[in-house]
Amino acid sequence: MVDIGRQNVSLITGLIQQDLAPSSAQLTWVADAFFLPVAALELGFGVFGDLFGRKRLLVGGAALIAVGSTVAVLVPGSGYSTDTRVSLLILAQLLSGIGAAAIFPTSLAMVAAGTHTTATRAHGVAIWAAALSIGGFLGPLLAGLSTKIHSGWAGNANWRWAYVGVLVIAVVSALLSLAIARNSSAPEGRSLDWPGQITSALGLFALLYAVIQGSESGWGSPQIVIAFLAAAVLLGLFVFVENRADAPLLLLSVFKNRAFAVNSVVTVIGMFGFLAIMYSTSIRLTIVQGISPLKATVAYLFFGGIGLVQLPLTSKLLERYNARRVLFTGLVLIGASGLWFAGVPTSDRTLTAIVGPLILAGVGSALAFAAISAVAVNTLPNHLAGMASGATSTFRDLGFALGPAIMGAVALSQAAKEISRNLADNPTLSKAYAAFQAAPAHAPADQKPQLEAAVHAVGSGPLGANSVPGSITSPDGHVIPFNPLKDVAFHALSSSYSLAFVFGGVGRSGGGGAHPRGRARWRGPGSSRRRPAHPRRLTARRARRRRDNRSARRDSPKAVVAAGYGVQEATIDRHTRTGVAP
């Protein structure tokens, strides 16, 4: 359900653009409003589940997704202002994201609490991970199919049916959880880290606000500068309070382990690159090229579906080779796919032109998702495995949130500059655009609302300018020039999103290049660097390490590799699974 909701909006951005005519920044907020609370609240909800019962959070998270989907379905029609309608849709995404943040750590912790042997736990976690993989490619498919429904809403407003599907699934999930799920909790040693939760959430919000709004308000405008400063101060305060908290959300001393610290950086950069490529693909297919959501679903089947097909291979690779090598390979494949995407001309609207980079992206993401979790839990001691898993999930979701925000801001600001440059350098185009803007004032009363909506859409930014047709057919069959910026916006967006693919590919490959070599030794709080141990001690340490590695390989559930969320989770103690410091 969570992955279906997360993938839902990617396929319907084109219809949302054409129906609501949001600005470029507003459309980016619609996508990022889901990821922001997941990244900011995931660790905190793990503590809430331990203290107050995980079943409550599971039911409450599903209910919040249902409420968010209901708000999206009830977004009013054209009788209301664009700002009102878009604000309601952003609120809907935000509520759904909070619900997802509650479900992610809670559902896995309940699996751990309800299983008491290695075999049953491996089976339970495998089912949990497989459900995530299935949701990853079922979400886009259901969204594409739902937009073909022609009852209730007409034309571009059909995007609401995608949220109806999520609403039904969320209600069923809440009812089943209420009736079947067994409650569990682990309050021993847990406490709410309110200072850490508040500073991290507000810091991330300020950072994303500055990044998303910067292209529209101006990077040097007072509000953007203040937002960046606020983000720096709040995130600095987060580090300060976490270092002094008795039960911190994030145990900062784990970053003294070089391998874990570098893996965390690689996770953020890699997931940023992946979402940048995935988000750019969505914008390219549905908005720039005008491909229908159902046809664009093919791309997301490659992104999410290859993981299940590739499961045996991924499992074998992680068993046979160092997980860092698998991670490096996955990141390089994703980076190569982004660079390949950038070289495919946007004028080629056939899906066969992008099958190659889609396969690379699907194979690479399946390897990377699995290996990131494996590296994280294998670089820290067993009693910190839950912290490693939770922290890695947070960094992964932070990369997910930053991908659309930064790439959307960069690509759209670049496209807007190119359109402005064309208007300034071409007097004929400038004159035609001025006439187009003045058209509603001279139009008959029955045509005035449609013309005003078209002028507003073209003026909202590059995406809106591309969504309004360049010509229309009159009742007598004559083709009449309409939007003079259509072709200019198309070429500007093609160029800017090719640049976004390059950035995503380079960022992904750069994350792969940063992967650590060797095995870093854990140095916990209060420890310091020591002189090299005696050779006998080193030999004994290597022997223990080999025994631990054999045990980990024996207990690791292969099926969990499919989604990359729970590699070796079956061996993690249920009291540390929520990602909170023990």
Image (cartoon, grey):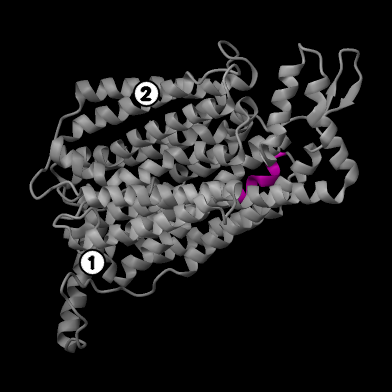
Percent x, y for residue 379?
28, 65
**Residue marked by disc 2:** 67
Report if residue 288 lies within the magenta region. no
Is residue 415 found left or right of 278 in the rendered image?
right
Residue sitting at 41 percent across and 51 percent down?
A: 398
State the quadrant of the C terminus.
bottom left
Quick one: label 1 or label 2, which is nearer the N terminus? 2
262 or 318: nearer the viewer: 262
Percent x, y for residue 431?
87, 38
Secondary structure of residue under mark 2: helix
**Residue marked by disc 1:** 253
- Vertically, is 328 above or below 234? below
Residue sitting at 50 percent across and 56 percent down?
A: 225
Q: Residue furthest front?
A: 222
Residue range corresponding to the magenta coloring: 350-359
**Callout 1–callout 2 Cβ contact below 8 Å:** no
Residue sitting at 54 percent across and 58 percent down?
A: 333
Which secondary structure type mostly characterizes the magenta part of the structure?
A: helix
**Amino acid type, mark 1:** Ser
State the quadrant of the N terminus.
top left
Residue sitting at 85 percent across and 31 percent down?
A: 435
